[in-house]
Image (cartoon, grey):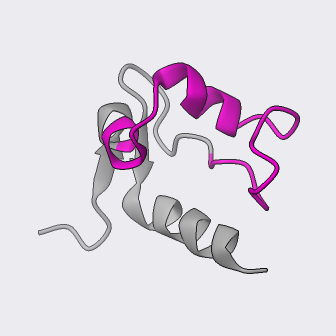
Amino acid sequence: MHKNPVIFTRDILARYQISEKTLWKWRDKDKMPRAFLLPFPAPTIPGVPNRWRQSDVMEWEENNRKV
């Protein structure tokens, strides 16, 4: 088992129940929801499909909870 698994675009979309268009808006500082402190991280492994390290996504979640 990997210590830092890789997750795919489809996993991100399912986790947050969003569309792919919304995911890419979250990555843009000017279009992300005002409630976010940081834009969503760029894919760790770009391509088709894009992939992220699970730890990067969890870190983003944690950092967006801090106020």
Q: As drawn, is 62 to the left or to the right of 8? A: right
- Point 42% across, 46% down: residue: 16
Q: Residue at x 11, y 69 (%)?
A: 1
Answer with the quarter of the image where residue 32 lies.
top right
Query: Is residue 64 shown left or right of residue 17?
Result: right
Residue farthest along the right direction in this orientation: 30
Q: Is residue 15 left or right of residue 1?
A: right
Question: Please, what is the dominant secondary structure of the magenta stretch?
Answer: loop
Task: Please tell me whether residue 45 is drawn above or below residue 60 in the rendered image.
Answer: above
Label total for image? 0
Q: Position of residue 42 (x, y in %)?
A: 61, 42
Q: Looking at the image, which is closer to me, 35 or 61? A: 35
Q: Position of residue 50 (x, y in %)?
A: 42, 30
Front-most of residues 52 and 17: 17
Q: Provide the residue span drawn in magenta.
A: 12-41
**Is residue 30 rendered magenta in the image?**
yes
The residue at 56%/66% (across/down) is: 61
Quarter of the image where the C terminus is located: bottom right
Q: Is residue 54 above or below residue 62?
A: above
The residue positioned 51% from the left and 62% from the top of the image is 56
| Residue at far bottom of view | 67
Q: Is residue 43 above or below residue 19?
A: below
Please provide percent x and percent y for residue 39. Answer: 73, 49
Question: In this orientation, which residue lies closer to the viewer: 20 or 59?
Answer: 20
Front-lying residue, 35 or 57: 35
In the visual, does 18 lie left or right of 1?
right
Measuring from the top left, give residue 49's x and y in whole percent: 36, 24
